[in-house]
Amino acid sequence: MTDKMKILLFERQAGIAKAVAHPLRIAVIDFLKDGERCVCDIAEHVGSERSNISRHLAVMVHAGVLTQGRAQGFLQPQNALCCPVAVVYHSSCQTAGQGQ
């Protein structure tokens, strides 16, 4: 792997880390690890406004952590985790947090 490719990889990794480095986003990841959900379900679960959740979802979609799409039979777009690293990161943070 060339140095330029390594730098691009590191930038991508940093983008993912930034995208999940917020308490609300971690709560969203925790909720979505069990499957796709619409923004209204996510907002209700984490106790935040839909508009706020939508902004956070957009950050995670842009970083490649989530995907959004319309599932058959659903009116609202569904949000799903597409980055396995986010789940591993979330799990690691839970383990580290419990050790303190």
Image (cartoon, rainbow, N blue to C red):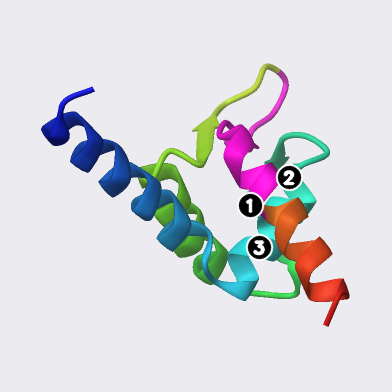
* Label 3: few (<14), some (14–19) or many (≥20) C-alpha neighbours in 10 Å: some
Q: Magenta stretch? A: 73-89
Q: Which residue is mark 1?
A: 39
Query: In terms of sequence position, does the residue under pointer 3 or pointer 2 come before the other?
Result: 3
Position in image of residue 28 (x %, y %): 68, 57
Image height check: is 78 above or below 96?
Answer: above
31 relative to 59 in the view: left or right: right
Who's the residue at 73% across and 45% down the image? 32
Measure how far apart labels 1 and 3 are at the Cα level.
15 Å
**Mark 2 or mark 1: which is in front?**
2
Q: Give the secondary structure at mark 2.
A: helix
User: CB under 8 Å between callouts 3 and 2?
Assistant: no
Identity, as a three-letter code, of the amino acid under mark 1? Val
Of residue 71 and residue 46, the one placed in the foreground of this image is 46
Q: Quadrant of the C terminus?
A: bottom right
Foreground residue among 29 and 89:
89
Residue farthest to the top? 72
Q: Which residue is mark 2?
A: 32
Q: Which mark is residue 69?
A: none
Q: Quadrant of residue 6?
A: top left
Q: Amino acid at mark 2?
A: Leu
Q: Residues within 10 Å of mark 1 (few under 14, many from 20)?
A: many
